Image (tube, rainbow, N blue to C red):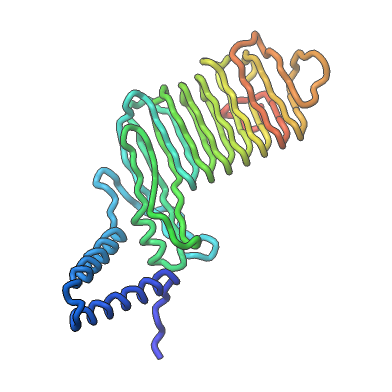
Amino acid sequence: MPNQPYLSQGDRAMRRFVLFVLAFCAIVGLGALAPRQPFCSRFARSMHVVRSVRAAQVPSNWSTGECQENHHNWGQAHVCQMRRTNFALPGGRLSVETENGGIQVTGEDRSDVALEARVQAWGPSDSDAKNLLNQVVIETANGEVRDHAPKRQFSREGYAVEYHLRVPRHLAADLHTVNGGVDLSQIEGAIRFATTNGGDSLSRVEGDVQGHTTNGGLDIALAGDTWHGEGLRAETMNGGVDMRIPSGYSAHLETGTVNGGISVDFPITVQGEIKNHLATDIGHGGPTVHVQTVNGGVSITRGGPDSGSGE
């Protein structure tokens, strides 16, 4: 007996429904219900629309390519595609929102945005994964980056988008992801970022910067001799804080933790004992650099963006 092709539960349900409708239309064509035949024609047209959606194409202003790494996702079929495009940034404001995937933003001497998206999809079979991948749409209108796809009926299917954006150094940005981290480097401006499950990394960032994560650590590397702008406020609920500060840096430093310790590897002036909160001027003082966690330790060392964990 020849092997039968694999059909997901959804495909089997759809096949039964189609057979039922075809049988119904055949009966209608033979019997007294013939005046209702237009329903059958409408059903056939709707099935054509469904097939067209499954073959959705990436817009012409995007280029596509293969991912360097392609693997299966928890034992399921997995497909991956790189998508690239450029777009203008009206008013110098960028917004990125995604549910599954990280957001990496790097400042450059440029006026537009170069976007690279790594789109992954998975499902019970190769065809399921490819169909879902083809339905993932990424929009960039008015500097607002969003991804979406039709709601999936079965939890065994899903997709994720990892974003890497090369942007002007000076801009305003609002970045939000649920399952993924946020990585910011070499940008200055009014920056807001938030994630639920993922760590945040900041390097050579200045301006009015505020952000938080729920489940993830903070890795922060300051640069120069002082903070330029209103200040930094970065917080996490469950995760440690690792911050590196160059020698000779001036700022008002605030940090704290509820369940964890605070470690500073260079001399500072404080009043009282350091337990779970620290507020002091380093150098000549300046804008406030505030980093905080609830469940995790805080480590502050001498170093900078190029020194790793310290000098």
- Establish if 97 lies above or below 80: above
- Establish if 67 lies above or below 29: above
- Establish if 170 lies above or below 130: above
Q: In this orientation, does residue 134 appear?
A: yes
The structure residue drawn at horizontal position 64% and vertical position 10%, both measured from the top left corner, is 285
Residue 274 screen position, x and y as percent: 80, 22
179 or 40: nearer the eye? 40
Q: Is residue 243 left or right of residue 165?
A: right
Q: Is residue 277 left or right of residue 285?
A: right
Q: Residue furthest front?
A: 32
240 or 16: nearer the eye? 16
The structure residue drawn at horizontal position 45% and vertical position 32%, both measured from the top left corner, is 106
Residue 293 screen position, x and y as percent: 68, 32
Residue 190 screen position, x and y as percent: 47, 22
Work out which quarter of the rendered image holds the N terminus and state it: bottom left
Q: Residue furthest top?
A: 284
The structure residue drawn at horizontal position 66% and vertical position 11%, both measured from the top left corner, is 283
Quarter of the rendering containing residue 55: bottom left
Residue 54 screen position, x and y as percent: 31, 60
The structure residue drawn at horizontal position 58% and vertical position 43%, both measured from the top left corner, is 197
Q: Residue furthest right?
A: 273
Work out which quarter of the rendered image holds the C terminus and state it: top right
Q: Residue furthest left?
A: 35
Q: Is residue 37 left or right of residue 109?
A: left
Q: How many labels sit on residues?
A: 0
Q: In this orientation, does residue 78 appear?
A: no
